[in-house]
Every structure is written in structure tokens, then in C-alpha cells.
């Protein structure tokens, strides 16, 4: 475990903080970090058998669904070797395939009721259905980050990682015109939900805007109006750089920090230095993402299993600021978190940022 959680850590009493982007609360309870075994930074183990049978490795293109896109510098046909990144439909999709014109758009009432429902049309009240549903249509893709059997983004190296981010942007842009929101994730390790160890991202082109994303959109817009043109996350990173206590690293493109109301230990947020609504229309961030992964490995001696997601602007939204969130799987959510929606973080972001800074080669906060 990282240093800083001893009896004399001086981190103070439990504190409730409000996230600037969502308005949701997190409880910081640093005293709970003293419990035995509070962190379990288990790395994702590589299995030789898994590598031998991996369907994502180059030369096994026939073991995946038909390719929808591939980055092939030398040219070549789909579903053949010679690619750097490729994208295929998820074999076990969470979304039913949308129609070719992007017919995953929700209905005017949110897609959760139907005017053809005889019970609804015969209802004597104007109350909505108590058992509303709608088809979960959309697109669920897998983007394979490397032709070699690499199991972590960190193992790709800086150049190949930059290529993976470029592939994510290409595939997100392909769906941004029709989907209400495009959400991209990376799960590394079984604790993070990965069923295949070969490094890959998953893309969800959704017919609705998830509630947490909608909260961010509303708060970005309200802040922009209230400050007569200010950008919420841009102002946050200006303050984070000035205060430095949660700052991990900064370069000419982006800022990496532990959020004020971090929901879990060593959570990091990567943000471009100037406001840009859409990740898919930008080119920044690859260098600091690699630094974030290096810092995590430096703190724990081995890269813990983790979740990562890209937050980009929903369709039709102009006031937004994309960001990447990195969450190592060090603790689990229990009854309080699941029952209240309020996370308890046992390791304050100020301590986490100090540990992460110390783990980076040189001083990346200048």
C-alpha cells in the first residue's frame, strides 16, 4: 500500500465533498484506510493458455465477428492480418443492432412508453406506465488495441497507445451523428469486468443520454450561463494547477489530477487544457494517459486492475469538456454505496496525488 495512511497521517475527520461535474456526493473517510488489507492491488494475470486461444490476436481474424473497421497502413482486405487496430461487433452485445440510419433514437417521452400500448391508451389517468420499457437498440463494438497479445494499455508503449486512442476517436466519430451518446470503456482484469485479457476497448452507441452524463451536461451549461462564458472543467483545472495538492502531472496538451470528490482511491481524471466538447474531434491526451498508468504501476509495484472511460459530449451539445477517468480496482462497493449512491473513499485524493507524483520519473507538474 502507498505511504501516507499511518496513525499520524493528519488527514482529519470524515468529510463530504460534492463533485463539480455531477453534483453527487462522496464521503472521504481516511481513517478506514487503516483497516488490514484495505487495498488489494491485484494485477491481471496473463495466462499462456489464454494467449494461445485468444481470438483478438493477429492471424485469428476468422474467430471474431466480421470486421467493421481496421487501421491497415499497408492496405489489405478486412478480416486479414496486417492491421494495427481493428473493430468488430461485440459477440455478446448489450444493445440490439440499430437500423442503418441510426434508428436508435429514443421517442419524445424518452423511449420508455408506447402509444400503441392498449393499457396506456385506455388509462383514465395521465400517469405514465409503472412498468415502462423500450428496446435497447444501438451499437456495441469491440476495438482491439493491438495485434500482439498485450493485456494492458501500459504494455502498448507510448506510440501504440497513441494509435489506440486514434482508433477510439475514429470509431466514436463514426457513430456520433446518429447516437444520442457514445460511451467508450476499457476494462483491465477480471475484477474490472474483463472476460478477455487481450487489450481492447468497448464502444456503446446509445439511443439515450445516461443520467450521469446528463447531469454533467446540465452543470456545464448552467455554469457557462452563470459565468457569462466560463467553462466549468477548464476553470477546475486552472484551480487544480494553481493549488497543486491534487495535481499528478501536466504537459502542453492536458492535465492529470485526482478529482476533488474522488469516488475511489487513486482515481484520476485526464482533461485537455482548453475546452473541447468532443473527444473524437481532438488529438490530445495520449502522453498523460501513459503517464497515469506508469504512476499507478510505480505506486503499487504492479499495475492494478482498472476501469477507464471516455466522457464526450452528447449529440447536439456544444458546452462540454471531454475527459478520461481512470479508476483502479482497489476496493469494493458495499451496502452503503449501493444503497445510497454515495461512495466512500478511504484514501483522500490529496494523498493519492502525492503518491502518484512521487512515482513518476522526474517532476511532471512543472
Image (cartoon, rainbow, N blue to C red):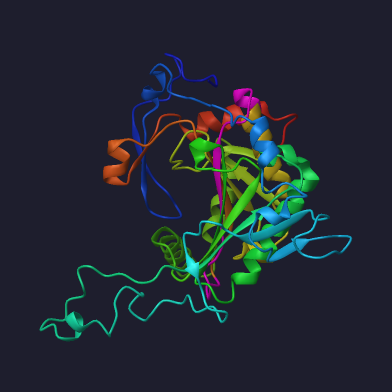
Quarter of the image where one finds residue 242: top right
Between 262 and 194, the one lying in front of the other is: 194
Q: Which residues are magenta?
A: 298-318
Rendered location of residue 229, percent (x, y): 54, 69
Is residue 4 highlighted in magenta? no
Between 47 and 155, the one lying in front of the other is: 47
Between 75 and 172, the one lying in front of the other is: 75
Does residue 251 appear in this view? no
Residue found 29% across the figure and 76% down from its top: 113
Is residue 317 highlighted in magenta? yes
Residue pushed farthest left?
124
Residue pushed farthest right?
74
Rendered location of residue 61, percent (x, y): 72, 55
- Quadrant, the C terminus: top right
Residue found 85% across the figure and 64% down from its top: 76
Residue found 54% across the figure and 56% down from its top: 233
Amino acid at each position: 500500500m502507498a505511504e501516507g495512511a499511518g496513525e499520524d497521517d493528519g488527514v482529519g475527520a470524515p468529510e463530504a465533498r460534492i463533485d463539480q461535474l455531477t453534483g453527487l456526493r462522496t464521503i472521504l473517510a481516511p481513517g478506514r484506510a487503516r483497516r488490514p488489507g484495505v487495498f488489494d492491488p491485484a494485477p491481471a494475470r496473463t495466462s499462456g493458455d489464454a494467449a494461445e486461444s485468444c481470438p483478438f490476436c493477429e492471424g485469428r481474424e476468422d474467430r471474431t465477428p466480421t470486421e467493421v473497421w481496421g487501421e491497415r497502413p499497408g492496405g489489405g482486405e478486412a478480416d486479414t492480418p496486417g492491421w494495427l487496430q481493428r473493430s468488430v461487433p461485440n459477440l455478446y452485445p448489450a444493445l440490439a443492432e440499430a437500423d442503418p440510419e441510426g434508428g436508435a433514437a429514443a421517442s419524445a417521452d424518452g423511449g420508455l412508453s408506447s402509444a400503441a400500448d392498449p393499457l396506456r391508451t385506455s388509462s383514465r389517468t395521465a400517469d405514465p406506465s409503472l412498468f415502462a420499457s423500450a428496446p435497447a437498440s444501438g451499437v456495441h463494438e469491440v476495438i482491439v488495441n493491438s495485434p500482439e497479445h498485450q493485456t494492458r494499455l501500459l504494455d502498448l508503449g507510448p506510440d501504440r497507445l497513441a494509435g489506440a486512442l486514434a482508433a477510439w476517436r475514429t470509431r466514436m466519430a463514426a457513430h456520433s451523428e446518429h447516437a444520442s451518446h457514445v460511451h467508450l470503456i476499457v476494462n483491465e482484469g477480471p475484477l474490472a469486468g474483463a472476460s478477455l485479457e487481450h487489450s481492447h476497448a468497448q464502444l456503446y452507441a446509445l439511443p439515450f443520454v445516461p443520467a450521469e452524463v446528463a447531469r454533467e451536461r446540465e452543470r456545464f451549461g448552467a455554469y457557462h450561463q452563470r459565468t457569462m462564458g466560463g467553462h466549468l472543467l477548464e476553470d477546475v483545472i486552472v484551480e487544480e494547477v494553481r493549488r497543486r495538492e491534487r495535481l499528478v502531472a501536466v504537459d502542453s496538451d492536458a492535465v492529470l489530477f485526482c478529482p476533488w470528490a474522488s469516488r475511489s482511491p487513486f482515481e484520476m481524471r485526464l482533461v485537455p487544457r482548453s475546452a473541447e466538447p468532443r473527444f473524437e474531434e481532438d488529438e490530445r491526451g495520449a502522453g498523460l494517459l501513459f503517464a497515469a498508468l506508469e504512476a499507478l504501476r510505480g505506486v503499487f509495484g504492479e499495475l492494478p486492475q482498472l476501469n477507464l472511460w471516455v466522457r464526450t459530449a452528447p449529440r447536439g451539445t456544444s458546452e462540454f469538456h471531454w475527459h478520461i477517468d481512470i479508476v483502479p480496482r482497489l476496493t469494493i462497493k458495499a451496502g452503503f454505496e449501493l444503497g445510497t449512491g454515495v461512495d466512500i473513499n478511504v484514501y483522500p485524493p490529496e494523498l493519492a496525488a502525492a503518491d502518484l507524483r512521487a512515482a513518476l520519473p522526474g517532476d511532471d507538474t512543472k
